[in-house]
């Protein structure tokens, strides 16, 4: 099966760009634009992967991570965090979890593909 991925970013252009790229790779993509939608859609759809901006209205991606960790249905979903801020600036709010990764904007599609391959079985094609 091809991966189902939630992309969460309050910048609709970035969300659309990521969505289009992932769709071109045959993934199923759900776009959301704030932290509340992210938590709701993750619980509803239980995606294989979440790609989320750190700073969004409603709730930061790192705060939504905490909510998802408390729910048995969503606690195992890997998360790729993205931000315009450098890692050194936001490292304190990122979880230290083997199922998370970080990419600084502007997003390198090669880096995103690498992390998808690390976080999902068979590089994004899930059994």
Image: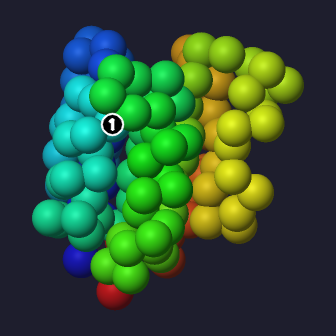
Tell me if 34 is positioned left or right of 91 in this view: left
Count of numbered badges drawn on the protein: 1
Tell me if 54 is positioned left or right of 86 in this view: left
Q: Hey, which residue is sitting farthest right in the picture?
A: 88
| 122 vs 83: above or below | below
| 112 vs 115: above or below | above
Bin the neighbour count of mark 1 within 10 Å (Cα to Cα): few under 14, some 14-19, many 20 and up: many
Tell me if 56 is positioned left or right of 13 in this view: right
Residue drawn at x 41%, y 62% as measured from the top left: 68
Residue 61 drawn at (x, y percent) = 47, 38
| 99 vs 53: above or below | below
Q: Secondary structure at mark 1?
A: helix
Residue 50 drawn at (x, y percent) = 39, 52
| 121 vs 96: above or below | below
Quadrant in which the N terminus is drawn? bottom left
Residue 27 drawn at (x, y percent) = 25, 55
Q: Nearer the viewer, residue 52 or 57?
A: 57
Residue 27 visible, this angle: no
Residue 18 drawn at (x, y percent) = 33, 31
Residue drawn at x 49%, y 23% as measured from the top left: 55
Residue drawn at x 24%, y 27% as measured from the top left: 33
Residue drawn at x 51%, y 56% as measured from the top left: 66
Toward which corner of the image does residue 90 lie, by quadrant? top right
Residue placed under numbered mark 1 in the picture = 35
């Amino acid at each position: 099966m091809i991966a189902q991925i939630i992309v969460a970013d309050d910048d609709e252009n970035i969300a659309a760009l990521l969505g289009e790229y992932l769709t071109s790779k045959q993934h199923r993509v759900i776009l959301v634009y704030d932290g509340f939608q992210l938590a709701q859609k993750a619980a509803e759809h239980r995606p294989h992967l979440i790609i989320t901006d750190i700073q969004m209205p409603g709730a930061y991606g790192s705060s939504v991570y905490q909510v998802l960790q408390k729910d048995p249905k969503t606690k195992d979903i890997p998360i790729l965090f993205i931000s315009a801020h450098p890692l050194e600036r936001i490292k304190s709010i990122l979880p230290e979890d083997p199922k998370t990764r970080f990419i600084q904007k502007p997003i390198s599609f090669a880096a995103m593909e690498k992390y998808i391959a690390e976080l999902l079985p068979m590089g994004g094609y899930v059994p």
